Amino acid sequence: MTKKSELISEGKAKSLYTTSNTNELRMVYRDDTSAFDGKKKEALLGKGEVNNRFNAFIMNYLEERGVETHFIRDLSETESIVKKLDMLPVECVVRNIATGSLCRRLGVEQGIKFDEPLFEFFLKNDDLGDPLINDNHITAFGWGTEDEINFMKQKTKEINVHLSELFDKNNLILVDYKVEYGRYEEKLLLGDEFTPDGCRIWDKTTGESLDKDRFRKDLGDVVESYQIVAHKLGIDI
Ligand code: 5GP
């Protein structure tokens, strides 16, 4: 008898289901969109499909360049099969240009371009508003080891080199992004997703935001902007 697919977690924009393989999960990209730790919510028609395709392209692109990820294959317009990871409860953010929470937190000017990308850890906790944390918090509370911290910093910056180049040659600027990692057979793999929901992308010519800031700031054309980025990158949607 085949085992039924069970919902194991429901995030703000994706749901995870079991599969017949205990090491694999089915990731479903929904149209639901949220910002400000879930305080602003809306369903945007077609976003699930764009994000599923976008993520598949980026994960394959990174795998080809030596970044190991949880992505196995896409299953349908809105679903992918991924390795089941034991996720670390931290978010890794890399910034090439100062904006967003960095400017709010530190009162620094928007638009400063960093010579060296800036790296930050945040704790994944909506109730606390995903607070900024440092390496010491991660080891002290057992959220990760020193080796895992070093790995996450190094990999996230490596991802920045590959993706900044990709975006740049398609007339786009990768301003900043968030990634997450999880344990799989004694090593860390890139997990979760890489989509315009979790990064900032600006048009190099006009400076226009083509990412979730359009939703956060009520600029409209959210899914259309994600599609523009996808088409510029040559993603088939
Ligand atoms: P900021 O700290 O400026 O709000 O975000 C920095 C970058 O990380 C942005 O590209 C933002 O989209 C992404 N990011 C930060 N926190 C989250 C989160 O909880 N969920 C998602 N999807 N992206 C996040």
Image: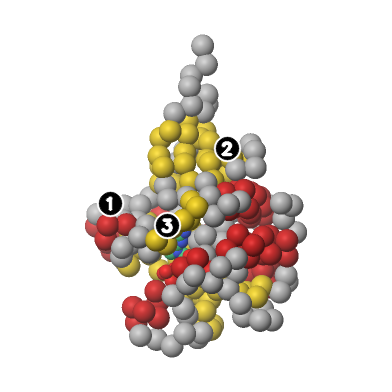
Circle 1 — which element? loop
- The residue under label 1 is 142
Classed neighbour count for the residue bearing mark 3: other residues with Cα under 10 Å, few (<14), some (14–19), many (≥20): some
Toward the viewer: 100 or 87?
Answer: 100
First of labels 1, 3 by sequence position: 3
Task: Name which residue type carries label 1.
Answer: Gly
Whole-number angstrom distance, CA of label 2 to CA of label 1? 29 Å
Badge 2 crowding class, 10 Å Cα cut-off, few under 14, some 14 to 19, many 20 or more, is: many
Residue 201, position as x, y percentages in the image: 59, 70
Q: Select label 2 or label 1 by which is in front.
A: 2
- Residue under the point 47% across and 34% down: 17
Q: Is residue 44 above or below residue 73?
A: below
Residue 161 seen from this side: no
Asked which colour scheme the image uses, the reply is secondary structure
Is 137 on the left-hand or right-hand side of 5? Answer: left
**Tag 2 or tag 3, which sits nearer the N-term?**
3
Nearer the observer, 44 or 229 = 44
Amino acid under disc 2: Ile
82 lies above or below 225: above
Q: CA distance from mark 3 to mark 2?
A: 26 Å
Whether residue 202 is visible: yes
User: Which element type, helix, strand or loop, lies under badge 3?
Assistant: strand
Task: Indicate the position of residue 122 as horizontal and vertical percent values.
Answer: 36, 63
Q: Which residue is mark 3?
A: 41
Distance from the alpha carbon under mark 1 to that under mark 3: 32 Å
Q: Secondary structure at mark 2?
A: strand
